[in-house]
Amino acid sequence: MKHPKEEELIAYHDGEAAGREMIATHLGDCPECQAELARIDALLAALNTIPVPEPGEDYGQRVWQQISPRLPLRRGHWWDFLFSEPKSVPWFAPRRWAAAGAIAALVLAAFIAGRISKPNAPGAPVAVDQTKVRERILVMAVGEHLGRSEMVLVELANSGPETAGQKEVNISGEQRRAEDLLEENRLYRQTALEQGDTALAGVLDELERVLLDVAHSPQQVTPAQLEGIRQRIEARGILFKVRVVGKELQQREESGSTPAKPSSSAKSERNKV
Amino acid sequence: MNRMPSVETTVESDAIAVERTLAGDRDAFRVLVERHSRNVYRLAYRMTGNQHDAEEVVQEAFLRAYQKLSQFASRANFGTWVYRIAANYAIDRMRQKKSEDSNRALPARETEDGTEIDLMSTVPDSAPSPERLAQSGQLAVQMRRALSQLTPAERTAFVMRHWGGSGIEEIADALKSSTSAAKNTVFRSVQKLRKALEPFVEQRGQARAMGTEL
């Protein structure tokens, strides 16, 4: 074989498959090409030593703070306004969460009031519809809450040291979100209990313990501590339960039906884990 | 036990976040921003060569990703997708800057086949001699200089290929060119860097061998 061209040697360095075997065979017998490849290797290795300034652990959070006011609102669900921030208020601002909590409480109050004052008079379709609307609002709100809880748990399951030697992992983001979710979770659990949906209340109760666990963890955890949190989440099977209940609520929302209690099959699915 | 997040679980979690963002939950997009910012920053820094521009590329890449999110195929990898958006934006920005710089200093020039010529690279080199560079350990400075003399397309191709591990098709996509043109651009970038840097790299190798490197 004649000497490979410079571009073929560069492609060989890059691991390109085309003609690889032939080039490798040639290299075995040709000191000249070996030296040429060594020069390419040395140059690219030298270029690898150019340092990139480390932007810092909180870089992602800073980027979010800079871009979030510029993100246009998407047409989503009616509850978007609970979770979207005004331009000048950062997403974690307490007053935003206070407002979201207050609105969530109002939704719940309206729902409970609707249940208590449900008219007995037959042939009052408007009132019945209002009750249904309230129930659907709650179903959607709890479904949304479970979805966001699921995301925090998946985040934790995926977090870990970026390099093998890293001694601590920052979970402050997940921790903050867990704290925020705790308040909502308590409200929904109490409402579920009042409605006699003990299975939903049970899952929310378990979720509350996991959220508490995360919220009370240090911001920087060692890989061993993180693994401990992860094992406690896995031991409760909470991620699976949250998904099952979330799916059930989604089905309820889609069908528009509002069973007073979850079906026995759904219950048994929740209790499988 | 140290457990690194696997690519599969990250992609799965990204897919959930994308879905929720599309459903109107903007906080879900925060997860994606926080997870991928640093990686995009590394690409942007290597392409632009400075922190200020790199940070702007990162912000713009995520803003564009948010706007185009409905075009993102949920089975694709969000990290790779936003990386490509950043590369696209960075190359446009570098071209614009180069053009502004040349308007201020020297007129832009192109070869017959449309290849950009960086006129700065034809200016007589007043850099320190190779001996001096090798002795004073300023190879990094010289490397930055050589990279800055690549055209935006060459620099993008080089960074994506050698630092980002991107495939030729991905590079072609960012350069908006054919795969054979992208391959050629990668080759040309390495060739230029070799020409500019090999004497210094060899000198460093010799100095190392003799134990005289500073």
Image (spheres, grey):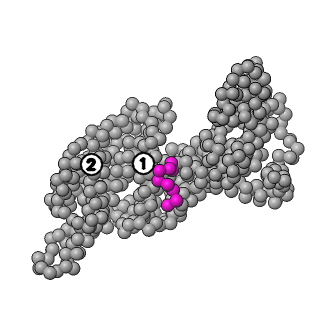
- Say whether residue B49 is magenta: no
Kindly identify the amino acid type of the residue bearing the numbered disc 1: Ser
Quadrant housing residue B124: top right
Residue A77 coordinates in the image, percent (x, y)? 38, 66
Relative to B186, residue B82 above or below: below
- Secondary structure, mark 1, is helix
Q: Is residue B11 above or below residue A141?
A: above
Is B166 positioned to the left or the right of A7 in the image?
A: left
Is residue A154 found left or right of A45 in the rendered image?
A: left
Task: Name the residue that disc number 2 marks.
Answer: A241
Q: Say whether mark 2 and mark 1 are on the same chain.
A: no
| Dot 1: chain letter | B
Range covered by the magenta-colored residues: B70-78
| Residue occupying image coordinates x 69% and y 35% | A11
Q: Which residue is mark 1?
A: B13
Instruction: Say if mark 1 contacts mark 2, CB within 8 Å.
Output: no
